[in-house]
């Protein structure tokens, strides 16, 4: 007999019913509507738009292939998380009756997240097989979620804080690391996958800055403080704890195994990177974010990490 | 724009807590995976694939333009349903242990298509003189506040029942009505818009039927009763109150839309008369009843409101 599923019984935005009218469908944030249109024009299909036949497994050792399978499976787990996080934000936009541009862009953004999960899954499959769960159970919690879905449905949680933490924080860091992968990935198929995903991620990141440019003037100092705290928590407690990059996680068997898999995958040019190359990218991204949010009145402190020092 | 959420006394909607691993992303319902792959191949662009440049409304009278604007505004209101509903359904599939990967992929792309449909309907309404952002009758407006996202995401909703009522029955009915709008359209731009949307809606309806056909074998008697109850509720409290067919609304609450639809239909701008819609509804429900019967579901016979 299977165990009863765990259920959350906390207030959410769903408890308030629907109030559809007046239903605004006009263009209210042109730059975000343009992102929706751009995403429409730039669709691709992981099955047919990647030259999978160019993947030559014979070029790699068994150890490298196993590591790369693990790496791309881990990417698939993370992208899969977004399949249910992006829609939660869309429900929030609809429930709060925010600008229709947000709702339309997030409809296609969720599809792109599904596409990314699919392409990472296919990459792992082509390398020998998708891995359905972390080999080390301890690692499951860190790749399961960063809590965005729950926050998006929580009426007491500031939407701006979620967007800033998720998009202007976590997604910017992920994007810069991904862009760096273009320089260190040599396998032609892995490179195609990285490029294809990155083209979508450009829009995902742009969304956050466009959204905040539209909203920032209407926020009070207290609301800006909430944003600041959320961004600090995302960087300090999530990213610097190894959410995207295993080498940032505290030393333990789980993170060590991931770091090892990343190194083997990187050596093979199959799409990962390593601590010594990623560290300056990570630091530069955080410093850039600090500069970009400063005009909003958001002050990011100097962070400190045992493997980086102060930055 | 300020957030509209406020706390009230309603009990919290129970929501499942995700147990992600082991994560199965493999293909397990081939028919639905094919729909997903077909959707990716059939991608289209509302801005580029409809001949907006040659869309000239000046040849239609003021009355026709006003009517068409209202017909297509109402269609926007109905199409909008998917924008919050599909994300909720997608999350629900992700949260419920053992649900297949194929519906998750498919629902992700379905929502993009729904966004395109909303934008197209809105654009046509604007072209005919201006989108109308609400029904004039408050009772009719209230019909649209169905909170489908709460139903879809609520852990106390039987997911298969929801899919049967909304993705199979409702989306199937919607497809038949849109086919009718298409058959009755003569304006090239309107016709092209309807063609593209109908192609998407074929997949949307197929998804619902494929999924319930896949799941039916494992339903208990109680599950079948729950499915039938959900269908009964949807037909009686939503469809037959005028959700898709405005003439079904009680007390002529949507009279101005019924009148507008007649004018729009006569002008070949993508609508149907109540009589034509009634025939479609009757035929479709008879087919749906047979299809559900084959799955062990006794679909209720509820009198269709008179046109």
Image: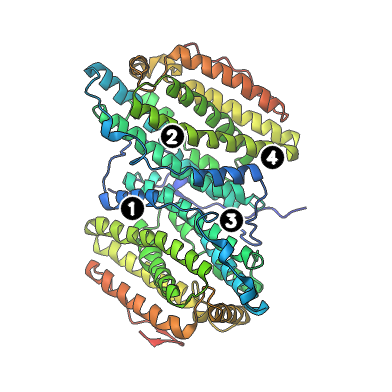
Residue at (52% x, 24% y) in the render: B176
Closest to the observer: B22 or A264?
A: A264
Element on which disc 4 rests = helix
Q: Mark 4 lies on which chain?
A: B
- Circle 3 packing at 10 Å, graded few (<14), some (14-19), many (20+), is some
Of tags 4 and 2, the one toward the viewer is 2
* Circles 1, 4 touching at the beta carbon (< 8 Å): no
The numbered mark at residue A35 is 1
Q: Name the residue under label 4.
A: B214
Mark-to-mark CA distance, 1 and 4: 37 Å
* Residue B131 in view, yes or no: no
Mark-to-mark CA distance, 3 and 2: 38 Å
Closest to the observer: B197 or A230?
A: B197
Mark 4 and mark 2 lie on one chain; the one further toward the N terminus is 2
Q: Name the residue under label 3.
A: B17
Mark-to-mark CA distance, 1 and 3: 32 Å
* Circles 1, 3 touching at the beta carbon (< 8 Å): no
* Circles 4, 3 touching at the beta carbon (< 8 Å): no
Mark 3 and mark 2 lie on one chain; the one further toward the N terminus is 3
Q: Name the residue under label 2.
A: B196
Residue at (25% x, 55% y) in the render: A214
Q: Do labels 1 and 2 share a chain?
A: no
* Circles 3, 2 touching at the beta carbon (< 8 Å): no
Q: Mark 3 lies on which chain?
A: B
Q: Are marks 3 and 2 on the same chain?
A: yes
């Amino acid at each position: 007999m299977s165990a009863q599923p765990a259920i959350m019984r906390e207030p959410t935005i769903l408890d308030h019913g629907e109030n559809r009218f007046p239903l605004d469908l006009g263009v209210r944030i042109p730059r975000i509507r343009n992102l929706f249109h751009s995403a429409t024009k730039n669709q691709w299909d992981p099955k047919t738009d990647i030259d999978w036949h160019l993947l030559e497994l014979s070029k790699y050792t068994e150890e490298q292939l196993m590591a790369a399978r693990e790496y791309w499976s881990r990417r698939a787990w993370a992208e899969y998380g977004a399949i249910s996080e992006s829609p939660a934000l869309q429900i929030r936009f609809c429930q709060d009756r925010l600008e229709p541009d947000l709702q339309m862009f997030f409809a296609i953004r969720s599809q792109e997240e599904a596409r990314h999960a699919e392409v990472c899954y296919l990459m792992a499959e082509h390398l020998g097989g998708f891995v359905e769960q972390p080999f080390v159970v301890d690692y499951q919690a860190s790749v399961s979620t960063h809590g965005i879905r729950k926050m998006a449905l929580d009426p007491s949680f500031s939407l701006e804080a979620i967007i800033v933490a998720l998009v202007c924080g976590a997604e910017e860091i992920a994007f810069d690391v991904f862009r760096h992968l273009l320089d260190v990935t040599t396998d032609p198929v892995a490179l195609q996958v990285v490029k294809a995903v990155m083209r979508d991620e450009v829009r995902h990141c742009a969304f956050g800055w466009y959204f905040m440019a539209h909203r920032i003037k209407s926020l009070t100092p207290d609301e800006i403080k909430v944003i600041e705290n959320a961004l600090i928590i995302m960087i300090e407690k999530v990213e610097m704890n190894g959410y995207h990059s295993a080498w940032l996680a505290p030393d333990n068997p789980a993170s060590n195994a991931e770091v090892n898999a990343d190194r083997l995958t990187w050596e093979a040019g199959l799409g990962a990177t390593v601590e010594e190359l990623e560290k300056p990218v990570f630091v530069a991204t955080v410093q850039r974010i600090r500069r970009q949010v400063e005009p909003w009145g958001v002050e990011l402190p100097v962070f400190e990490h045992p493997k980086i020092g102060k930055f | 724009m300020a957030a509209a959420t406020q706390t009230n006394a309603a009990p919290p909607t129970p929501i499942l807590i995700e147990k992600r691993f082991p994560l199965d992303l493999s293909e397990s319902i081939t028919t639905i995976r094919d729909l997903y792959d077909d959707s990716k191949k059939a991608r289209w662009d509302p801005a580029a694939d409809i001949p907006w440049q040659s869309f000239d409304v000046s040849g239609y009278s003021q009355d026709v333009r006003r009517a068409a604007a209202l017909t297509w505004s109402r269609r926007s209101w109905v199409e909008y349903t998917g924008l919050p509903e599909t994300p909720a359904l997608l999350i629900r599939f992700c949260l419920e242990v053992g649900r297949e990967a194929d519906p998750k992929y498919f629902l992700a792309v379905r929502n993009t298509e729904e966004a395109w449909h909303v934008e197209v309907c809105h654009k046509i309404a604007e072209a005919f003189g201006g989108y109308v952002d609400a029904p004039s009758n408050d009772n009719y407006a209230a019909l649209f506040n169905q909170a489908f996202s709460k139903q879809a995401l609520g852990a106390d909703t039987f997911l298969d029942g929801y899919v049967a009522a909304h993705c199979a029955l409702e989306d199937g009915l919607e497809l038949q009505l849109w086919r009718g709008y298409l058959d009755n359209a003569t304006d090239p731009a309107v016709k092209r818009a309807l063609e593209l949307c109908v192609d998407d809606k074929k997949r949307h309806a197929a998804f619902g039927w494929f999924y319930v056909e896949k799941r039916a074998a494992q339903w208990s008697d109680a599950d079948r009763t729950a499915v039938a109850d959900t269908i009964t509720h949807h037909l009686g409290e939503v469809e037959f109150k005028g959700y898709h067919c405005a003439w079904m609304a009680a007390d002529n609450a949507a009279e101005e839309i019924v009148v507008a639809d007649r004018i729009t239909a006569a002008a070949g701008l993508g609508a149907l008369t109540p009589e034509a819609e009634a025939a479609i509804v009757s035929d479709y429900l008879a087919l749906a009843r047979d299809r559900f019967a084959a799955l062990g579901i006794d679909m209720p016979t509820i009198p269709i409101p008179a046109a």
